[in-house]
Image (cartoon, helix red, strand yellow):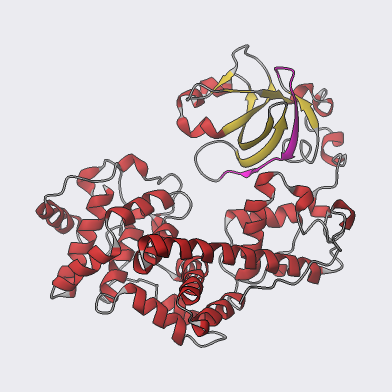
Amino acid sequence: MWQRLLRNGSELTTDRGETIEILYPGRPNDGQGADFRDAVITTVGGLLKGDIEIHVRSSDWRAHQHHHNPIYNRVILHVVWRQNSPIMTRLQNGGMVPTLVLCKHPAGENNPSSDWLYHQPAPNKSCSRSWDSSAPHRAVECLESQGDKRFLIKASRFKADIAQYGPGQTLYQGIMGALGYAKNKLPFLELARRLPLPNLEVMALKKTTAEGCLTMLQALLLGTAGLLPSQQQATHPEDAFGDRSATTLEKQWASFNLSQAMPTDGWDTFRVRPANHPVRRITAISHLVLRYRKTGLLTEMLNLVHHTPPGKGYRQLEAGLMVTGLGSSIQMLSPLLGKARAADIVVNVLLPFTFAWGRLNSQRGLKKKSLELYKSYPRLVTNSVEQHMLSQLGFNSRLVDSARRQQGLIHTYNTLCTQGKCHGCPLSTVNYPSLRPGITSKPKSSVLPA
């Protein structure tokens, strides 16, 4: 009912008698916490953005102990089929959340699976009907324009970070954040702050052998992260430590006499695939520091982009970031940093960073090359946000056949869908220009500043 009916302007009444309007029902959550993320509703108090939790009975909130779990503090609405308890929905932080009872809605008075519920159209046009499928080139123009905006925003942020942290540390932080995905981005950034790249590179140069350097880097990184076996109770993937033994790393970490490790409960491993475990990703960054220790990560990455040929040169960029381990005898379940994750880092970090670096240092050639590579970059592995947006918009996946267009979907989701700005969506003007007076149905082509 929540996804099919209660959306696009439906006005409903909560258990408190307050009228609410659903602007955006959110997307299904594939991690810990509430059932739907990033929903937008309006109440008498104004616009609310957050999560939606769904239950059959209102008493399930307390039965599932959500009132003791801080993860559910993002919830803005508790949606239930029936209310069987007078107790109001309370968050762990003491806040109160309104409850929406669906069985009182006209569609659910008799049966939630009735034909009326599943086949009656929604009050307003859904976004899957808001673009002209007979003119896909217009949707493509919109997606590429949105993708270019996302690229420029990233480049602007990197430009500001370079001024604050320096170029090498900024690139390093970008890579570390990308290794953490959405769930562990903040812990990875904290680790990058505690162990800055210049410090790691200086230490790496002091080691005469690659073997000793790698052991030192991995022990320092994993120990500071609080992810060595002696620091936590959780089990690790079978090949979590790559080509180092846990015993070797523990001995090396003990020799540092360091006690300032990050709290282990800050890492989220819920439903994280073994190949994406933080231990493996941290091990991967140690290999990159070792690989480029003579000239430095920054110099090597700038040279990599500068010398990458157009067309299928993107494979060269990915190869510069991929990590499979040292030694042909190492048997791993998967690379420490494979092609898919390397491609994500190239598109989301490396290219916007080098674009910003080129702009700061008046290197027009590097800036132009970064933009050309971005615009021609092939499709990345589909993530959950993109899958949700394809379903929302009713797009065929073949329409979104480049990284640039995928970035456009993500930018649309972040800046419009999750902000309740449906009527300001450029995709909705493709078929319904009257929603935005003065704007033609054909969006302007994306123009990036020189």
In this rendered view, identify the residue nearer to me: 264 or 167: 167
Which residue is outermost to the top?
Answer: 86
Rendered view: 320 above or below 138: below
Q: Quadrant of residue 90?
A: top right
Report the residue at 71% width, 69% height from top. Answer: 398
The count of marks equals 0
Relative height, residue 121 to residue 369 (above, below)? above
- Residue under the point 46% across and 55% down: 181
- Is residue 27 left or right of 154 when viewed as pictured? right
- Quadrant position of the N terminus in the picture: top right
Residue 26 falls inside the magenta stretch: yes
Q: Quadrant of the C terminus?
A: bottom right
> Left or right: where does residue 38 sit relative to residue 187?
right
- Place residue 291 in its image quadrant: bottom left
The spot of residue 357 in percent (x, y) is 46, 73
| Left or right of 97, for residue 7 | right
Residue 330 seen by the camera: no
Q: Position of residue 218 (x, y in %)?
A: 23, 61
Residue 174's spot in the image, x, y percent? Answer: 42, 62
Residue 322 seen in this snapshot: yes
Q: Bounds of the magenta span?
A: 15-29
Is residue 129 covered in magenta? no
Which residue is at 40% across, 46% downward?
269
Query: Which of the 4 quarters of the picture holds residue 114?
Result: top right
Drawn side of residue 104 relative to residue 32, left or right: right
